[in-house]
Amino acid sequence: MPFILRSIAGLGAGALSFAYLIFIVNPLQMLSVLVYPFSPSAFRAFNRACAKSVWGIWVWMAYVQNRIRVRITGDDLPREENALLISNHQSIADVMVLLCLAWQCGRVQDMKWFVKDVVKYIPGPGWGMRFLDCIFVKRDWARDKDSIKKLFGKYARDQIPVFVVSFLEGTRRTERKAQEAEAFARGKGLYVPQQTLVPRTKGFVASVTGLRDHLDAVYDVTIGYPERVPSLFDCYACLVPHVEIHVRRYEMQTLPESPDELAQWAFARFEEKDRRLIAFQDGFRFPGPEVLEYS
């Protein structure tokens, strides 16, 4: 198929997938509330299936229709374990990349995202994530900490499978934000990042503390785009030929116990991540054993 036709087909399929989410999946999720008083587990199972149907379509589009070559290096990840993912954040396209990683781990239906509170009012993704017990935050720790603690308690109490995604930088990296991060790091005597932002550690510390007995591991994920940082439009329009993912897996028992040590642990991982991305600019490939290449 000529590229222009494939691009048009990709955009059309993307539009149809959002229509499916808004006009079919969201209404079904709303009806599932009627089941919750009688069987919370059935309610969750139905909504996990809804998530898999939508996010699975997007993974299929990435791999099959849009022919994105996804190369994963680093540690070989077990399937179907509870994990917290900490990733760099360059674009909304990162969401698509992490969906592909979750699919390979058998956890796409169990993804729980840290997202801005306002997102929950957006039809489609926002409404859908409300039914999946995603973590909506106002970026004010004093206001967020109680609701986060309560939600993490629910995960553990009800033994809910989780694949929690947290962008510790708190926002997508832009040139202006990069300059602000460099100035902040210098002022605080921290490592000065060149390819990432300074991580915000309160949410990470709360996640590890609140979910330590429920999680199997923390995945340190680094996403690299060899050509350029794409937009979500680029993903659907077949303009993303290649993505690199590097993953380090840390078992929960290896992480520090104290909040201060956990914060320092997160800073150390982001320093490594930043240096990895600096090296990535020379050759646009992550080092280490290749655990999967899908193309």
Image (spheres, rainbow, N blue to C red):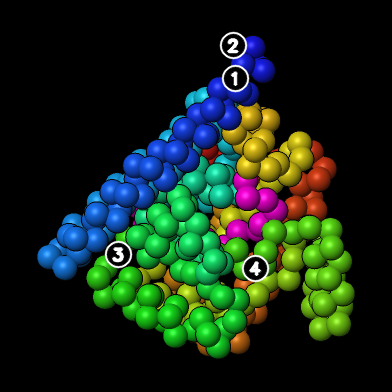
Mark found first going from the N terminus, 4 or 3: 3
Q: CA distance from mark 2 to mark 4?
A: 40 Å
Q: Amino acid at mark 2?
A: Met
SS under mark 2: loop
Residue contact at pointers 2 and 1, CB within 8 angstroms: yes
Q: Residue furthest left?
A: 38
Residue at 69% over, 59% down: 172
Look at the image and tell me whether residue 77 can be seen.
Answer: no
Residue at image mark 4: 170
Mark found first going from the N terminus, 2 or 3: 2
Q: CA distance from mark 4 to mark 3?
A: 25 Å
Residue at image mark 1: 6
Mark found first going from the N terminus, 3 or 1: 1
**Residue 1: mark:** 2
SS under mark 1: helix
In front: mark 1 or mark 4? 1
Mark found first going from the N terminus, 1 or 4: 1
Residue at 76% over, 40% down: 228
Q: Amino acid at mark 1?
A: Arg
Would you say 174 lies left or right of 156 here?
A: right
Q: Is residue 21 above or below residue 183?
A: above
Q: CA distance from mark 1 to mark 4?
A: 34 Å
Q: Residue furthest top?
A: 1
Residue at image mark 3: 160
Q: CA distance from mark 2 to mark 1?
A: 6 Å
